[in-house]
Structures are given as structure tokens and as C-alpha cells.
Amino acid sequence: MATKRKRMNVYEAGEVTVMDLGAMDIWDGADLALIRDTLVLLIQREGRRKIGVDMSHVKYIPSGFFGMLFDWKDRGVEMYLLDPQPNVRKMLWFRQFAERLMNNAWRLTSETQEELTPDGVGHWEDEIEDEMLRTEPAYRAR
């Protein structure tokens, strides 16, 4: 059985260094540790400033993955998500902070990409204020 480290493939795609974990549907804590260790090697030791993560097979990602990438983005590293599956593209953090560059590539950004409001709900703050104005306070009802 191959170790996870042997399964990680790192290659160059133009100016971007791409990390590929292979055909894995679900990433676990060990995968995140491998990604973290590889990022440290590529960024701190080798000085890479544009990193892509191949997500073509991934259907589920632990919440720590985004935070880890965002930390690097905040340190000035351009982080790219390549070929993410529909499940990943629907995730809240993805919809908020992944800027679409082309069909299969997104870049992490600090600028909100999509204004998120629950379906079927209007301006809930206004609704609460209206309800409060229509309801007599309990202390006055006596």
C-alpha cells in the first residue's frame, strides 16, 4: 500500500505549482496534514508564491482546509482551487471567497463574491422591527 506522501503529485502548470492528491473523494485529517506540510515546503523553503490545489476528485473537504489556505493567502501567496466538484463549489466558504477565473479555476480572495441570503427570506431585520412595533410589550399589557 502506498503512503499518502507518495500519492501526492506536485507539478508546474505555467507559473502555478499544483498539488494533486489523486483520486480521493474525501479528504481527512491526515490529508490536511500532508497538504499543510507540502505547503510549508513549497512556500517557505522553495519560495513558491502561486499554489494550486487539484480538487477534481474531491466531494468533501474538512472545514480546516479553507482556513489553512486562507492563512497562506493572507501572507501574500496566491491560492488557486482547480477543477472543484459541484459539491465543493456549493460550500458556503467557497461561494463567499472563491473568485472564478475560468471554467475550471478559482482564486481565493478576501472580497465577498456572492451575497448570501437564505432562500425565501427577505429583509429579516426589517421583519423583526415591524413585529416588535406591532406587539405591545408585556409590561404595558397589564
Image: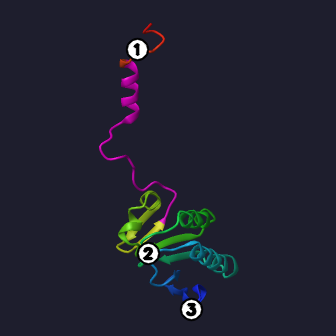
Q: In the depicted view, which residue is nearer to us: 78 or 3?
A: 3
Question: Which is closer to the viewer, label 3 or label 2?
Answer: 3
Mark 3 vs mark 2, CA separation in Å? 19 Å
Q: In the depicted view, which residue is nearer to us: 10 or 77?
A: 10
Q: Secondary structure at mark 3?
A: loop
Q: Earlier in the sequence, mark 3 or mark 1?
A: 3
Q: In the depicted view, which residue is nearer to us: 105 or 28?
A: 28
Q: Earlier in the sequence, mark 3 or mark 2?
A: 3
Mark 1 vs mark 2, CA separation in Å? 53 Å
Q: Which residues are magenta?
A: 108-133
Q: Secondary structure at mark 1?
A: loop
Q: Amino acid at mark 3?
A: Ala
Please give the residue where the numbered disc 1 appears in the rendered image: 136
- In the rendered view, tell whether residue 8 sits above or below residue 65: below
Please give the residue where the numbered disc 2 appears in the rendered image: 58
Please give the residue where the numbered disc 3 appears in the rendered image: 2
CA neighbours of label 1 inside 10 A, class few (<14), some (14 to 19), many (20+): few
Do the residues under discs 3 and 1 have CB atoms within 8 angstroms? no
User: Is 78 inside the magenta-drawn segment?
Assistant: no
Q: Amino acid at mark 1?
A: Glu
